[in-house]
Structures are given as structure tokens and as C-alpha cells.
Image (cartoon, helix red, strand yellow):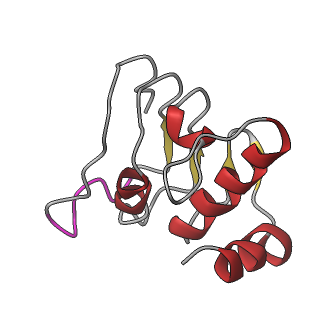
Amino acid sequence: MDLSENKFERILGPLDEGDFKTLISLRLNENNLNEWSSIDQLGRYTAIKTVWLGKNPIMNMTLQGEMVDGRDRHDARVIAISKMPHLQNMNGSEVRVHSFRTKAIWEAP
């Protein structure tokens, strides 16, 4: 499902366990997601295996909400991966279980 460029500021989790059970790919590029709670909610959609979050403010933030740039953007990716345990691909790149997910679990609260 492509929901890019819709100016969404937040994502809500499913209301029922059966909601969106067949949604395996979600594009949310170029929205206005700016809170980690939205990424937490995406993690509740357990069928999602692939997500795109490029060009959202959240992908340039630390857990404390501080803006980062350059190589520190990698940290936002690690945090996002830690919050979506079923993820296999993010922004077109494979999520490597032993590298990113392990690092994400240890670094993100």
C-alpha cells in the first residue's frame, strides 16, 4: 500500500488483531511523521515485512526528539528497526537480523 506524500503526522496501531493481516508492504515516504510513537504503532502491524519511511522528520531524530544529520541518520534507522520486530526490508534495504536488529535491541530502549 502506498500512502506516500499524504502529510500524515502520526500512525495509529490496529484497533483489532485482525486488522490489516494481509498488509505486507507499506510506503510512507514524504509524510510528516515526527514522533517515535508512530513507529511503535507500525510495529503492531505484524504482517508488515517491508516499509519505506524516507523523507519523514522522524528519520532525522534521536529518541529524545533531537534533530541529527549525516551519519547519525543511521541511528534513526536502527531505532526504527528495533520498534518493528517483523520487518525484513526498510527503505529498500534488507534488515540483517544479526547486524541491525541486534544493535537496535541493545541501543534502543
**Measured from the top left, where is residue 14 in percent x and y?**
22, 58
Is 81 left, or right, of 22 in this rendering?
right
Quadrant into which the N terminus falls: top left
Q: Position of residue 95 (x, y in %)?
A: 75, 60
Q: Relative to the observer, which residue lies in front, 56 or 71?
A: 71
Q: Nearer the viewer, residue 75 or 40?
A: 75
> In the rendered view of the protein, which quadrant contains the C terminus?
bottom right
Residue drawn at 42 percent across, 66 percent down: 46
Task: Residue 83: give x, y in percent of width and height.
Answer: 51, 67
Instruction: Name the spot of residue 63 as percent of width and height, x first.
Output: 53, 60
Determine which quarter of the picture holds residue 79: bottom right
Left or right: where 35 falls relative to 53: left
Q: Examine the residues drawn in magenta and state their main secondary structure.
A: loop
Where on the picture, by quarter, is residue 2? top left
Q: In this view of the protein, which residue sits in the foreground, 19 or 52? A: 52
Q: Is residue 9 magenta?
A: no
Q: Is residue 6 left or right of residue 58?
A: left
**Which of 91/49 is in front?**
91
Q: Residue at x 44, y 61 (%)?
A: 47
Task: Identify which residue is drawn at 85% across, 72% down.
Answer: 99
The single residue placed furthest to the left in the displayed view is 15
> In the figure, is residue 42 to the left or right of 60?
left
Seen in the picture, residue 14 relative to 58 is either above or below; the reply is: below
The stretch in magenta equals 16-22
Residue shown at 41% from the left, 28% from the top = 32
